Structure formats: C-alpha cells, structure tokens
Image (cartoon, grey):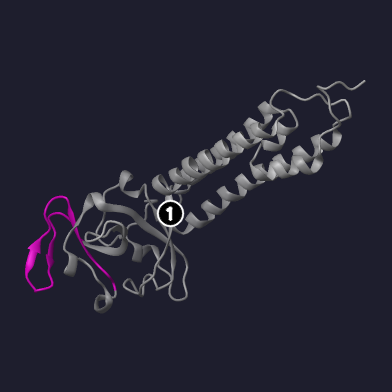
C-alpha cells in the first residue's frame, strides 16, 4: 500500500531539468542532498581555483588555462546530470519523499546557488581578482593590439610584482572613472619623460606616464596627464583574438612567469 508519504519513482525529465538548472540540483530531487551539495561545491571550487591558478601560467598559456578550467567545471556539471538521470531511472514505485522534496525548496536552492553564489560570488571573484576579458574598441595600441582584438588581463599581476616600463595595462580613465583605457607604461616614478609641449619632466611618486603605441591616434597622458598607480586595474598578458598582428610577450612587457 502506498501512503501519502510515498510516490511513484522519480521523474527522469524533472531530474535532468533540475540538473541542468544547477549542478547538484538533480541529486537533491533524487533525495541525495549531500551528494547534490558536494557536486555544487566541487564545481564552484574548480572555477575559483582554476582561474586563480591560471594567472601563474606563462602569458601565451592563459587562454588554455581558462579553457581547461571551464572544461573541468563542465565535466563535473555533465557528470552530475548523468548521475541524476540514472538515479531517477532506477527509482521504484515505493520511493519515499523527503521533507525537502518540494518545488519551493528546489527554487530556493536554485536562486541561492545559481544566482547568488555563481552569478555574484564566483563571477564577481574571478573578474575582480583573477582575470578578465576585454574587447579593444580603438586602434590606439596598434600594431601591438589591433582594433577589435580580445585580450586577457591579469588582475593579480601587480600584487605579485611592481609595474614595469613597457607593460600594457588596463586602467581607470582619469576624466571618467566609469571608463577603462588600455595604454603602455612609458615612465614610472623617478623616470624622465617628455610631455606634449616638449618639456622634460620627472614622474612623481605614485604615478605613471602612459602612451598609446599609435601616437597619432591615441588619447593618453599627453592629454589627460599622469595616471595614479592605484588606478591601474590589470596587466594585459595575452591577445587571444585579433584580425591583425598579435602581441608578443616582448611587446607586452616583462613576462609574469619570470
């Protein structure tokens, strides 16, 4: 006799759908709460640790490190879906519901896990503390970085080393802090530089003088002045897509794997 606390076996489509919605949610549907939480934690940990380790690779390997991290997380994700499918297909008619086998519990987990933890914590952590992708809209850095190029910028670089003359950097535009600019460091504190009027000056403490490689078509320190070192966001380490010449390690400045 099947009482009110029992139901027919788990719905395979529901298990797969929930598994697709978030890693481990299919396991929760199948009453494997601990396993579901484990799948979720492992997936998140791989993403965070993978991108954090990627920045330690040589410049030309950053894209491969990022792809390897994504593939590893995707493999765990896929495994959790397959596992949820198999478990649901093997459940029998005497399956007994747990107290958390409710639609609102699945929804709460999805909102918490998918939107808050992955969407805000993981994505936010990676983009703010590891690496970030930028699309370059102008030709001010040609030929090193062509217009339309896509670059990987390392946000940990200057936590591990000091900025170097010749580095290509992403920084906050002094006249509009909502904008991000890409230029090359031409001079650092104590270095002499020639300003737009031809006068020789020395960079003061805490600032950098930056220029675009394409001098005739670049808005840089000649117009907006020195850039505070604290406003340097990241070091550009790899151009992974370009319609023209790609940036070499020598053009990007000192390689971070030295």
Percent position (x, y) of residue 26? Answer: 71, 37
Total numbered badges shown on the rendered structure:
1
* Residue at image point 70% right, 39% down: 80
Identify the image quadrant of residue 20.
top right
Percent position (x, y) of residue 212? Answer: 27, 70
Farthest bottom residue? 216
Farthest front residue? 4
Would residue 79 be visible to someone looking at this image? no
Question: In the image shown, does 147 or 156 lie closer to the viewer?
Answer: 147
Left or right: 173 as drawn, with respect to 97:
left
Q: Magenta stretch: residue 25 in it?
A: no
Left or right: 110 as drawn, with respect to 164:
right
* Residue at image point 74% right, 28% down: 31
Would residue 128 be visible to someone looking at this image? yes
Q: Quadrant of the N terminus?
A: top right
Residue that numbered label 1 is attached to: 132
Q: Magenta stretch: residue 200 in it?
A: yes
Farthest right residue? 1
Left or right: 4 as drawn, with respect to 73:
right
Query: Relative to 20, is 191 above or below?
Result: below
Query: Relative to 60, is 136 above or below?
Result: below
Percent position (x, y) of residue 125? Answer: 44, 43
Percent position (x, y) of residue 115? Answer: 54, 42
* Magenta-tinted stretch: 187-213
Task: Classify mark 1: residues with Cα within 10 Å, few (<14), some (14-19) or many (20+).
Answer: some
Question: In the image shown, does 184 or 250 lie closer to the viewer?
Answer: 184
Question: In the image shown, does 19 or 236 lie closer to the viewer?
Answer: 19
* Residue at image point 22% right, 61% down: 175
Question: In what element is the residue under mark 1?
Answer: strand
* Residue at image point 24% right, 71% down: 219
């Amino acid at each position: 006799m099947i009482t009110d606390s029992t139901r027919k076996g788990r719905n395979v489509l529901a298990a797969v759908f929930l598994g697709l919605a978030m890693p481990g949610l299919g396991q929760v549907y199948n009453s494997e709460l601990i396993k579901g939480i484990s799948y979720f934690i492992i997936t998140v940990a791989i993403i965070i640790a993978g991108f954090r380790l990627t920045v330690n690779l040589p410049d030309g390997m950053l894209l491969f490190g990022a792809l390897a991290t994504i593939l590893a997380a995707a493999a765990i994700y896929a495994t959790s879906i397959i596992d949820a499918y198999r478990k649901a297909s093997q459940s029998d008619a005497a399956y007994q519901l747990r107290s958390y086998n409710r639609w609102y519990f699945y929804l709460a987990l999805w909102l918490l896990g998918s939107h808050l933890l992955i969407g805000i914590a993981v994505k936010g952590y990676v983009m703010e503390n590891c690496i970030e992708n930028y699309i370059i809209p102008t030709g001010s850095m040609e030929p090193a970085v062509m217009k339309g190029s896509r670059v990987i910028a390392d946000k940990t670089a200057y936590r591990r080393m000091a900025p170097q003359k010749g580095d290509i950097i992403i920084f906050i535009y002094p006249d509009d802090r909502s904008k991000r600019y890409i230029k090359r460091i031409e001079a650092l504190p104590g270095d002499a530089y020639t300003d737009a009027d031809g006068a020789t000056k020395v960079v003061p403490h805490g600032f950098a003088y930056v220029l675009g490689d394409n001098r005739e078509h670049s808005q840089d320190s000649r117009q907006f002045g020195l850039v505070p070192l604290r406003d340097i966001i990241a070091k550009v380490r790899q151009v992974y897509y370009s319609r023209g010449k790609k940036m070499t390690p020598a053009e990007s400045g000192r390689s971070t794997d030295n």
